[in-house]
Image: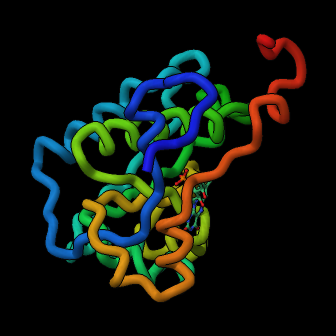
Amino acid sequence: MSAKTSVPIHSLLANRKSPRSLDSTVVMSKDGITAVLEAARWAPSSNNMQPWRLFVGQRGDKVFTSILDSLAPFNQNWAHRASLLILVAGTTKRQDGSDHGSYLYDCGLAVSQLSLEAHARGFVAHQMGGFDKEKAITNLSIDSVLAPVIVIAIGKQSGIEQLEEALAERESAPRERKALSEIVVQGLPN
Ligand SMILES: Cc1cc2nc3c(=O)[nH]c(=O)nc-3n(C[C@H](O)[C@H](O)[C@H](O)COP(=O)(O)O)c2cc1C
């Protein structure tokens, strides 16, 4: 179901969503995987420092299993069906050793681009903050210069009957957002 927008916006944005009902048989092609990673690569970033680092797991492989194991049980319950699990970590320091003030912001931009590329290819991307960062660091031997930021499940949407009732209801409900008048503090055209 497309988002109810006050004026039409690009269909990719209006139709993007974060489903949990994924098809556990779908494998993403090598080109598809490379394309979503390229999309992240070309995100803008502060001083073009590109602080994002990606750990990419395909269902069944060691990286996937390591990321899955770090997820909160609620997320494990559905994300195990994903074609890919990607953990994004960020470099928290600049080259001169000072704090990188915008690494989280920059990682978010990269994830946004990656997500939209996945959707443009007929896949869905679902971000998860619900994971154990310490467990992820151990499982993936993440270098101490990196801080885990987010995990993204990428897969093909499938039937909601695989979800338990409460989740199935959430999945079929219309997507909601605050009104523009609530988020635009000054300058909303009238
Ligand atoms: C930073 C962040 C963390 C999130 N963490 C989780 C999570 O742990 N589990 C989950 O099922 N969804 C998670 N989500 C998905 C959001 O719940 C979802 O994007 C939001 O409800 C809006 O729905 P939509 O993306 O379908 O428009 C997260 C999203 C973001 C951006």
Q: Residue at x 77, y 11 (%)?
A: 189
* Residue 5 in the image, given as x and y percentages of width and height: 58, 33
Q: Is residue 10 visible?
A: yes
Q: Is residue 178 left or right of residue 54?
A: right
In terms of depth relative to the viewer, which is nearer, 151 or 157?
Answer: 157
Q: Quadrant of residue 179?
A: top right
Q: Residue at x 24, y 71 (%)?
A: 23
- Number of on-image labels: 0
Q: Residue at x 32, y 37 (%)?
A: 117
Up the image or down, 116 lies above or below 160; here it is above
Q: Is residue 189 left or right of residue 48?
A: right
> Whereabouts is ligand 1, in terms of quadrant?
bottom right
Q: Quadrant of residue 55?
A: bottom left
- Scheme of image coloration: rainbow
* Residue 174 in the image, given as x and y percentages of width and height: 55, 56
Q: Is residue 144 visible?
A: no
In terms of depth relative to the viewer, which is nearer, 14 or 120?
Answer: 14
Quadrant including the C terminus:
top right
Q: Is residue 100 left or right of residue 88?
A: right
Q: Residue at x 35, y 82 (%)?
A: 161
* Residue 115 in the image, given as x and y percentages of width and height: 40, 43
Up the image or down, 110 lies above or below 10; here it is below
Up the image or down, 18 lies above or below 48; here it is below
* Residue 76 in the image, given as x and y percentages of width and height: 45, 81
Q: Is residue 82 left or right of residue 16?
A: left
